[in-house]
Image (tube, helix red, strand yellow):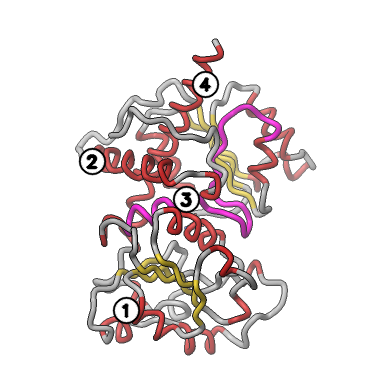
Amino acid sequence: MNKGNVISVDNLLGIKDLTAADINLILDTAVGFKDILQRPIKKVPTLRDTTIVNLFYENSTRTKISFELAEKRLGADIVNFAASSSSLKKGETLIDTVQNILSMKVDMVVMRHSASGAPHFLSNHIDAAIVNAGDGTNEHPTQALLDSFSMREAQGNLKGKKVAIIGDISHSRVALSNIFCLKKLGAKVVVCGPPTLIPKHIQSLGVDVSYNVQETLEWCDIANVLRIQLERQDMPLFSSLREYALQFGIDKKMLDGLKKEITLMHPGPINRGVELSSDAADSAHSIILDQVQNGVAVRMAVLFLLAQKNKSLADSLA
Ligand code: CP
């Protein structure tokens, strides 16, 4: 485990803020934590003096459970906040909510919010370290880190690797965080989807654009397929899910027909029969459940490195 190094940021708000060295430090640290998770006793006391609140203002299955497990495996005390059963319903603001929670001596905040920039806004008002667990259509940094960790495990060093991100790029925080992460690690990135689901000027991020899924699959080593986010679309951006599935859906026959090794990924939740058929999602090409498993180790690494950074900062101020 790379305990000698210190991450450059005090909060994990986005991959945009990280250096390549930060990303490699997180991924290398996660390797050590993954080893610990294979042992009969999967806990270490690393964060036993740390209290973390999980503040989820938007639904989540994987990210919420993964952070909770990561925190418990590190021995932290944790508090779970669900917006649906909170005083938010009585009109309490985000800052008041968090200030009240922090007054109970909480050290770190893991936050998911439907508004892009919500964790950045909060970071200007509180001292506790913040980890962004997904903000609107902006970033989902720990998803990109676990994706890169899983890609590295499947295909080795990502420098020069060809990665395609296929699907609803416009509404995806996973796409943006993956693009930042992969470009910093030296991968070649193509985004693929219908023109209405690819932002104008996305090439300025150093990626190429394709509107042809078959050609994209032939080009890439790794295909990271994304969900159509109907809940974030104000107006129809394609004629029907059936037509989307016909033009951009991926099935096992397409993957087998490539006659090469290809790694298939998806951050979840999958719309089976839309962006991926069940036989593709469950095929030998797929590492989708490895991504979920790796999420715990990667989040342990993020929490550990931020706690270490903030402790060294506090020690230097004492
Ligand atoms: N990948 C992901 O963020 O899934 P959840 O929305 O279930 O957390």
Q: Quadrant of the N terminus?
A: top left
Quarter residue 68 falls in: top left
Residue at 35%, 57% (x, y): give it: 291
Quick check: 114 above or below 318? below
Q: Nearer the viewer, mark 1 or mark 2?
A: 2
Q: Position of residue 280 (x, y in %)?
A: 33, 77
Contact? badges 4 and 1 (CB < 8 Å) = no
**Residue at numbered disc 3:** 63
**Would you name the residue on which mark 1 appears?**
279
Q: Is mark 3 within 8 Å of ligand 1?
A: yes
Q: CA distance from mark 1 to mark 3?
A: 25 Å
The residue segment tinted magenta is: 124-151
The answer for how far apart the CA atoms under marks 2 and 3 are is: 20 Å
Pick whichever, 245 or 2, lies toward us: 2
Q: Is residue 244 left or right of residue 33?
A: right
CB of residue at label 1: within 8 Å of ligand 1? no
Question: Residue 285 is drawn in which quadrant?
Answer: bottom left
Q: Residue at x 56, y 69 (%)?
A: 203
**Between marks 4 and 1 in the image, the one whose residue lies nearer the viewer:** 4
Q: Residue 184 colored magenta?
A: no
The response on whether ligand 1 sits within 8 Å of label 4 is no
- Residue denoted by label 2: 35
Type of amino acid under label 3: Thr
Looking at the rendered structure, the kind of residue marked 2 is Asp
Q: Is residue 189 left or right of residue 35?
A: right
4 and 3 marks in contact (CB < 8 Å)? no
Q: Mark 4 or mark 3: name the one nearer the start of the chain.
A: 3
Comes first in the chain, label 2 or label 3 = 2
Question: Residue flagged by tag 4: what amino acid is it?
Answer: Leu
